[in-house]
Image (spheres, coloured by chain):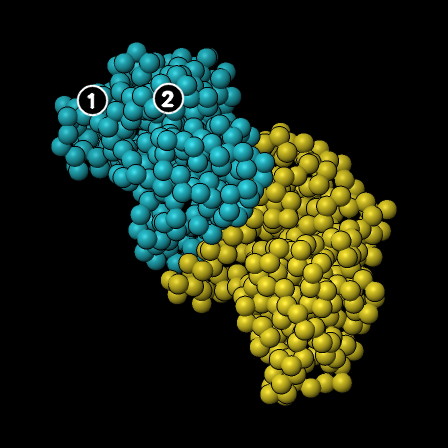
Chain colours: A cyan, B yellow
């Protein structure tokens, strides 16, 4: 399989991307070809300096970079030789099977939606976050910000997409789906949650177990937790800030809180688009890059996008 | 001033209510008369046993109790001799100036809305929670669950009610108001947040400082944080669960996390109703009861409800 990695995306790119490759190559003996997309005048010397060499490594020259504050659509259109534009071109044309970048999030989303396109039947693609659970397991929360306002059917679709991700990438057999809500009983909640509940209950593609509350996010009550992107984004950023607080107060050595560190999960896949696209955190470090490559491999190997396509037929 | 305390509400009532009175009386030398509402055959012996005596203490016999799982409206109507029904009767008729209970939350809300009534101009009363900030200050988040679906104007009203509470009860001069959102810039967010922003910006009664995100909840960026009750309830319960996790992992000795303990704040005042009503946590202990009495005193002394009435004229 062929994975494309944007070498120019992220606050510490290309250095951390290079180190991520180094970590990945030292750990893995797989048949994956890695296409490193970036400015070869910068990337080549760094790869040499860190002795990152492998017959599986291919450098694709991209002389332009899309900055963090550029307008996504405009930048993608005007900078066709940027690493992100080239990455999506390679993905769309089948030269690579997955594309990873820690660059401009907006440009990554625009690329995923318009170069790759949603899977037939998926109304809106979604982004998710991994949630470390107290029982040692790992949950998935979605949407975490792509869709601030949602119709009930969207939440129902997120449940399907999230369940497939949980099953095939997180290795959770028969993942339990919970609806983020303000009470346990059916009928509780805002209009959206009230209307989404019966759809989830009737959905034969998922294992819906009912409402979950704010206090259940870190427990094993549900593996896949669905909500609108407004609620999910606030939960995500609040959880991130709690890790930061624990870190500042030197409590992040705690076994549980340490699992909140973003680098363990690497990035956020865009779910519901036809091919694997992974967006990295701006502060991605080597470990995060390595883990994103591993997730991309798993998404390709399990044919996650194909399974999503099947579910929405 | 006269404060009514439901002796029968809370998982550990009446014992913890009695101990709370004991704590309060040992700390305070005020001119407050306390009306203890409950079953005298149970409360009287406990007060005697714990030597809780004071000329300022008055026992009001209420032979009935509204249980946790009773239907609020039905129970209030049928159990007129319950401690909650009697408490609201005393408050409505001016025999007491504030009413506190850790009993059936629904019954407390129904009593506050129908026996006491919203302040003229207040579209919907609201409940809030105290948020300990990293800089040592204290913030207020509202609504935390009374109004799951909100119109933009409601958020604007919560901002006024919350600002007055922050000013007069939390002693924050010129409290900064933030709108819970998913991005910093104006125009970000779901339809509700987008529509509420300009209302908050134009509101001369408050000091609006813009959007805040999930990561800002525990920082000093805003003192009063407004959102719909769905979002707020999830934030509240998630924050409570984080305290529980810290506690289980023995990290709650940490100076910051220890401030999350509910007992420090005692209860949740219903804001926007004509008289002070405070709802306690079901697990209220002695310290929580003591603190609720102190908050009620402050609400009466500052004439908070009068100031709210003024603002909505």
A225 over B5 or under it: above or below: above
Q: CA distance from mark 2 to mark 1?
A: 25 Å
Location of residue B62 with respect to A102 vertically, above or below: below
Q: Earlier in the sequence, mark 2 or mark 1?
A: 1
Out of B100 and A135, give the one closest to the viewer: B100
Residue at image x 47%, y 32%?
A199
Q: What residue does disc 2 label?
A: A312
Q: Secondary structure at mark 1?
A: loop
Q: Chain of mark 2?
A: A
Q: Residues within 10 Å of mark 2 (few under 14, many from 20)?
A: some
Residue ID at (85%, 51%): B310
Query: Residue B58 placed where, x, y %?
Result: 74, 79
Can the viewer see residue B12 in this picture?
A: yes
The answer to whether residue B138 of the structure is visible from this angle is no
Task: Residue A101 in the image: state x and y as whole percent.
Answer: 35, 27
| Mark sitting on residue A1 | 1
Q: Quadrant of the N terminus of chain A?
A: top left
Q: Is residue A131 above or below residue B255?
A: above
Q: Residue at x 31, y 47 (%)?
A: A137
B215 relative to B149 in the view: left or right: left
Q: Residues within 10 Å of mark 1 (few under 14, many from 20)?
A: some
Look at the numbered disc 2 and give the secondary structure of its residue.
loop
**Residue toward you, B58 or A249:** B58
Q: Nearer the viewer, residue A218 or A11?
A: A218
């Amino acid at each position: 399989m062929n994975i494309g990695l944007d070498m120019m995306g992220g606050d510490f790119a290309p250095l951390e991307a290079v180190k991520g490759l180094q970590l990945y190559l030292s750990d893995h003996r797989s048949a994956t070809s890695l296409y490193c997309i970036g400015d070869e005048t910068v990337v080549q010397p760094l790869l040499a300096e860190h002795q990152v060499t492998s017959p599986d490594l291919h450098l694709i020259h991209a002389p332009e970079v899309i900055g963090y504050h550029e307008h996504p659509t405009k930048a993608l259109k005007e900078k066709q030789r940027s690493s992100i534009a080239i990455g999506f071109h390679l993905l769309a044309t089948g030269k690579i099977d997955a594309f990873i970048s820690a660059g401009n999030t907006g440009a990554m989303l625009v690329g995923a939606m318009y170069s790759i396109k949603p899977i037939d039947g998926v109304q809106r693609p979604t982004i998710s976050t991994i949630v470390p659970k107290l029982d040692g397991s790992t949950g998935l929360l979605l949407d975490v910000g792509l869709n601030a306002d949602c119709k009930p059917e969207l939440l129902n679709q997120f449940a399907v997409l999230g369940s497939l991700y949980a099953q095939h990438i997180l290795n959770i057999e028969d993942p339990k789906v919970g609806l983020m809500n303000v009470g346990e009983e059916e009928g509780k909640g805002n209009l959206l949650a009230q209307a989404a509940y019966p759809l989830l209950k009737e959905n034969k593609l998922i294992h819906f177990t009912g409402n979950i509350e704010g206090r259940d996010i870190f427990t094993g009550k549900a593996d896949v937790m669905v909500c609108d992107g407004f609620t999910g984004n606030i939960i995500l950023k609040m959880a991130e800030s709690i890790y930061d607080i624990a870190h500042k107060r030197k409590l992040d050595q705690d076994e549980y809180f340490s699992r909140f560190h973003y680098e363990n999960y690497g990035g956020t896949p865009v779910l519901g688009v036809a091919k694997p696209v992974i967006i990295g955190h701006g502060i991605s470090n080597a470990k995060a890059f390595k883990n994103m490559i591993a997730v991309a491999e798993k998404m390709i190997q399990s044919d996650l996008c194909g399974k999503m396509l099947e579910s929405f037929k």
